[in-house]
Image (cartoon, helix red, strand yellow):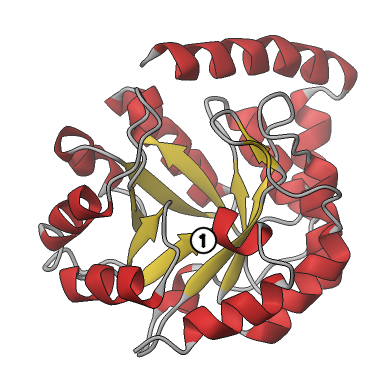
Amino acid sequence: MNSILNEIVAKNRTALEEKKRIAPFDELAARAAAAPERADFVAAFRGPGVHVIAELKQASPSKGTIREPLDVPVLAASLKEAGAAALSVLTEPFYFKGGLQNLRLASETVSIPLLRKDFIFDPYQILEAKAYGASAVLLIAAMLDADEFTRLLDFAHRCGLAVLGEAHTESELELASSADLIGVNARDLKTFSTSLERSAELIATLKSCGKPVVAESAVRTCEDIAMLRAAGASGFLIGETLMRAADPGAKLKELLQCS
């Protein structure tokens, strides 16, 4: 794991211990078990056309504040109406200015599938995702070893959640490919630079995997979507491009018209 991931995970580990003290595991598990079922996340990426996970993202370590304020109910409704297949909700508070309250607000506003986008390293976080309305969670191969990834994947499935496994290098693909969907991130997690060409090369190696492949990060134009679709992507996780738009719903409609 590189230094920025180490820093993010370390800070969130400390915060998680306090959460566990306030709401013990068994108490949270009961809340998660009582949570309503959400729409099927994997099913949202079947069939023809451009399938977009529209991301509600207020900030990032590399770009600072992206959208202020982040009006979750208004944005969620607008992006759902524009045709989003699913929403991704950033819940990491320290570096992305997210929070579980945003996931709850989105779940109360729309019925489409929701992804909890965070740095997941503990089953407790998966219970939180379920309790606050997620349909799926993200597991990042760069920050988990094989045993950790498998343990969290299995626990998510027992909770009724799908898993998007994220890779950004060839060496991470095997681990990420054990998830329900495979995310290929264009962002180099060491330098935070992006390369869609590198993503396309990795995506092309997954054409026979039989699972939905989601291109993540740096998707801005119809040309980007066309290149990644040709490589084999069946979904696109788009955050900053939408969140910087004056009208995110209109921007999403524009991208969904890409052929």
The residue where tag 1 is placed is: 238
Quarter containing the C terminus: bottom left
Horizontally, residue 124 falls left or right of residue 45, namely right
Report the amino acid beneath label 1. Ile
Horizontally, residue 65 falls left or right of residue 63, namely right
Whether 106 is drawn above or below 153: the answer is below
Horizontally, residue 9 falls left or right of residue 207, namely right
Q: Residue at x 57, y 25 (%)?
A: 122
Q: Residue at x 40, y 54 (%)?
A: 216
* Residue in the foreground of this view, choosing between 115 and 239: 239
Quarter containing the N terminus: top left
* Residue in the foreground of this view, choosing between 190 and 167: 190
Whether 2 is drawn above or below 112: the answer is above
SS type, badge 1? strand
Residue 154, quarter of the rendered image: top left
Q: Is residue 111 visible?
A: no
Whether 16 is drawn above or below 149: the answer is above
